[in-house]
Amino acid sequence: MSGTEAFVLHEKLAEDTVSLAKSELSELRLMNDRNYPWLLLVPERVGAREIYELAPADQQRLLRESSAIGEAMMNAFEGHKLNVAALGNMVPQLHLHHVVRYEGDAAWPGPVWGVVSPAAYTEAELREVKKKLVPVVSAFRSVS
């Protein structure tokens, strides 16, 4: 890979998510699934598939961004548990899932994948969840 390659978001991530904000490292995206409060943090580094492949400074920034949005999500959605995962089995491009969980949700206590079909937000629901995510986006943008 050359140093002039531009980062391109994986087509599956582009198809399944909505962009919320960008930092010097990452893009914050909302999973278009109203079953769970669910954000993705996508480091915009060409060819990155695993966290250890990032430069040390990027690894540290990713952890700070992840921690900031995780705390803000739990505050905004009053969850019981925050699931953070970097699976990449279906989409190899590095991305971190942040899913707020509730005791008794459709997948509790197991993982969210494959339990219920994704349910896309309506336009009105998307507007509402974006309003609820304002402090999360602010926390993400405040990471230095």
Image (cartoon, rainbow, N blue to C red):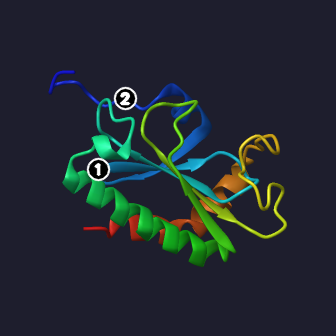
Q: At x 60% / y 68%, what residue is drawn?
A: 132
Left-right relation of 116 to 22: right
Residue 9's spot in the image, x, y percent?
42, 32
Q: Alpha-carbon neighbours of circle 2 within 10 Å: few (<14), some, or many (≥20)?
A: few
Residue 80's spot in the image, x, y percent?
69, 74
Residue 51's spot in the image, x, y percent?
36, 46
Q: At x 41% / y 70%, what residue is drawn?
A: 139
Q: Which secondary structure, mark 1?
A: loop
- Which residue sits furthest left? 3
Q: Alpha-carbon neighbours of circle 1 within 10 Å: few (<14), some, or many (≥20)?
A: some
Q: Earlier in the sequence, mark 1 or mark 2?
A: 2
Residue occupied by mark 2 = 8
Q: Using the image, determine if residue 129 lies above or below residue 32.
A: below
Q: Quadrant of residue 6?
A: top left
Give the camera-side residue of 110 and 124: 110
Q: At x 51% / y 26%, what residue is drawn?
A: 11
Q: Using the image, determine if residue 36 lies above or below residue 5.
A: below
Residue occupied by mark 1 = 25
Q: Which part of the image, by quadrant, shows the N terminus?
A: top left
Which three-letter amino acid code belongs to the residue tagged 2?
Val
